[in-house]
Image (tube, rainbow, N blue to C red):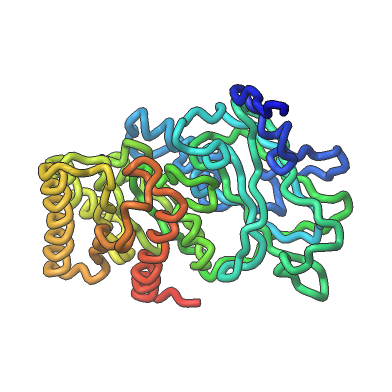
Amino acid sequence: MSENRLRTDGVDPARLDSNMRTEHPDGRWQWLEAASGPLQVAGLPGFEAERIYRRLPFRVPAPLPEAVIRLAGCTAGGQLRFRTDSPRLSVRVKLGGPASMDHMPSTGQCGFDAYIGPIGSMRYAATARPGLGRTEYESLLWDEGEGEREAREADESSGMRDITLNFPLYQSVEQVWVGVRPGSAVEPPHVYATERRVVIYGTSITQGGCASRPGMAYSNILSRRVPLEFINLGFSGNGKGEPEVGMAIREIPRQACLLLDYEANCTTGRYCETLEPFIRLYREACAEVPILVVSRIPYAAERSEKQKNEWNARREWSMSVVARLREEGDRHIRFVDGSQLLGERWDECTVDGVHPNDYGFMRMADSLEPFLKEALADAGIAW
């Protein structure tokens, strides 16, 4: 009788399982640089101002904290939008650095993912896999020939379909190209329902930690349901309500709604000190833009009574600030109870007891969607 014992250390899954291998483009491509038309870069105000893939421009009204300056280079919430009839698609990417987190996949940190179809009926299509330790990569998203029609949300008369590529969540992007079959038509995307944008300010959770791929950050989930541009200003560990950040945020043009989700990075004292001044500073420039003040989601890792009491104190402070401002006449501000966003089994919704997994982000988006739509309706935005 033979023994079926083999060493199991140092296993290379890609060598044993073809489904684990990264596909590489074969060179038969027409490459389009994302920084030039007809591709549209959305969700990155820094790109709009300075042609750099940044969430905030370098030129701002007041000096920002160094950490915010650096984190603004992460491209969370950025999107490439276009229409094409190409049956194959690839990306070529140059990053500012490699993946480096031990509780978030490299596909979420450094990859792109792709959706097909118009807003409201998008379908996930593929994820670019950057490889371990790499700062430059090419990744085939799909090559379907003339088959797999059921995956397409196409105009039957032209074969054109809407494509949305979500940028990496936790790394900077220096350059990105999109590859299509030579001779394929590439056109600008359909316009949004309005030029106004949803802006979300917050923490690592807002930024997308720890989604498995970019499209699963809650801001990107919402962007597939609401036909507006979304701007993700989640600054990992550094959503602290500084007035300098508030001044930079209020400079972003054409805002439809501001969602404040930064409680998780503050002590109780700091949150109570900053929330109302931050809102009043914003209101000086954006008097009628709807504001949603969202209290923090529950943490599975939070067990002590002291932690729970401080969480409740910040939640109650958010409620009281919103109530006071509404009493003063601000009818465009609402409170959203973060303790309810994850539902009953909220303990299953995180990677590490704090940061949501994909299931948690989906629950957050499901819960926030009606509040956001109500706020947009209040602003006269409908579709």
**Does residue 45 appear in the picture of this structure?**
no
Mark count: 0
On screen, residue 301 versus residue 198, left or right, reads left
49 in relation to 334, above or below: above
Depth order, front residue of 141/380: 141
Q: In this view, does 297 lie to the left or right of 379?
A: left
Q: Where 98 sits versus 321, above or below?
A: above
Give left or right: position of 160 versus 382.
right
Q: Position of residue 280 (x, y in %)?
A: 21, 54
Q: Name the residue nearer the viewer: 250 or 334.
A: 334
The residue shown at (46%, 60%) is 197
Who's the residue at 26% across and 45% down the image? 264
Compared with residue 380, is residue 247 higher up or lower down, i.e. above or below?
above
Residue 69, x across and y down, in percent = 40, 32
Tell me: 295 left or right of 364.
left
Q: Quadrant of the N terminus?
A: top right
> Residue 287 at what x, y percent from top left?
28, 62
- Residue 90 at x, y percent in the picture: 74, 45
At 20% from the left edge and 50% from the top edge, which residue is drawn?
275
**Residue 55 seen anywhere in this rendered image of the structure:** yes
Quarter-wise, where is residue 345 in the image?
bottom left
Q: Who is closer to the viewer here, 249 or 22?
A: 22
- Which residue is drawn at the image coordinates 35% and 73% (left, top)? 374
